[in-house]
Amino acid sequence: MRNIVVWEVIPMKNRNILGSGYAVGNNTVPNQAFESIIETNDEWIVSRTGIKERRISTDQNTSDLATEAAKKAIANAGIDLNEIDLLVCATMTPDNITPSTACLIQGKLGLQDKTMMAFDISAACTGFVYALQVASYMLADYTCALVVGVDVNSKIVDYTDRNTCILFGDGAGAVIMKQEATEKEMYHYANATGDMNGELICPGLPTHELLKNGNHEIGYLYQNGSEVFRFAVKALQEAVEAVLEKAGKTIADVDVLIPHQANIRIINNVVKRMKIDEAKVFTNLHKYGNTSGGSIPIALAEAMEQGVIAPGMCVVMVGFGAGFTCAASLVEF
Ligand code: UT7
């Protein structure tokens, strides 16, 4: 475990998450659908991952799912669309290399004439928590942020690779966060570890040394599953402990824990190690698989929709992903 240096922590005040929304791929793909493509079966997938089905988008690109989630978040927050002056989108499967997916969402929302900042963040499955943190710091200068986490993983998944293809799905989640007077507090922790071994990588463009050695197919996601698993368990615990330390709270103070929805065994491992009350852990990976950037905001939006998160509750969101990256945010609702 790394030593976390926690200096005097000033809580972030006057940041309020007002609403959320989500959208998932239109096509439901159960585990059984893989049995005719690769050597696998439903029992293996459920017992090793907890995933029963995932949603694959047949005609919606990343900005489409993101815009659908954003529209729901705007309606749920009850804000005027034109209040948004900051748009941060976390994705590793953008529509294009440029322009950013954030700019496409801005256009699809009809905000092209609005003076605002819009940009993407690349932090894989940790992306939404990074984006939320960046937006909350930027709300010192801006007033109303739309924060989106989205991935259409089916664009980069190799459906002949049984180590990865059964895990991933497509989806987007979004929140509206405003700068306004509130006593509610927020605390953030984030880390990146500069992985150079390509343990979780999608080369995409021929810019990576490994491509010259023919180690990865261009454009496909590759992972060393057990290495990622090991990192994930360590990182989730590290991030939750660090953010709790910053907030001066213990795990008992947390009402709802929203971990990155990658594998139920990763989550259960951390729950056991940290002696977390299982009833406080929100999961939906059995329905959606791992939606990468979409994972945490979809779970957050579903938890809010189902009344699992209510005003006054203390919520911790925690993610890990390629980079390797990890981050946790503690938010009082
Ligand atoms: O957002 C982050 C994204 N990545 C992750 O979260 C991945 C984290 N890692 C994992 O979730 C797990 O490591 C996996 C689900 C990928 C794999 O589970 P595991 O329990 O770590 O299995 P393993 O890699 O140790 O493989 C055990 C066996 C192997 O066969 P042999 O070598 O023992 O004959 C694999 O080839 O399971 C085999 N296997 C499969 N069998 C049936 C791997 N994938 C499959 C499959 N169906 N889909």
Image (spheres, rainbow, N blue to C red):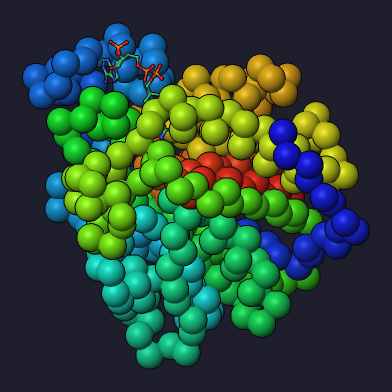
Query: Outermost residue, right direction?
Result: 8
The residue shown at (50%, 63%) is: 147
Residue 291: % across, % down: 37, 42
Residue 42 shown left or right of residue 114 in the figure = left
Query: Outermost residue, left direction?
Result: 36
In the image, residue 264 sits, relative to residue 126, either above or below, namely above
Residue 236: % across, % down: 62, 35
Q: Give the camera-side residue of 201 and 180.
A: 201
Q: Give the camera-side residue of 114 and 126.
A: 126
Query: Outermost residue, top direction?
Result: 43
Task: Count numbered badges in the picture.
Answer: 0
Question: In the image, ligand 1 is in what quadrant?
Answer: top left
Residue 46: % across, % down: 35, 15
Q: Give the camera-side residue of 215 and 105.
A: 215
Residue 204 visible in image: yes
The residue shown at (71%, 48%) is: 330
Image quadrant holding the N terminus, namely top right
Residue 249 shown left or right of residue 79 in the figure = right
Q: Give the camera-side residue of 262 and 321.
A: 321
The residue shown at (62%, 31%) is: 234
Residue 160: % across, % down: 15, 30
| Residue 199, picture quadrant | top left
Residue 173 visible in image: no
In the image, residue 157 sits, relative to residue 10, either above or below, namely above
In the image, residue 131 sits, relative to residue 297, either above or below, namely below
The residue shown at (78%, 45%) is: 4
| Residue 45, picture quadrant | top left
| Residue 120, picture quadrant | bottom left
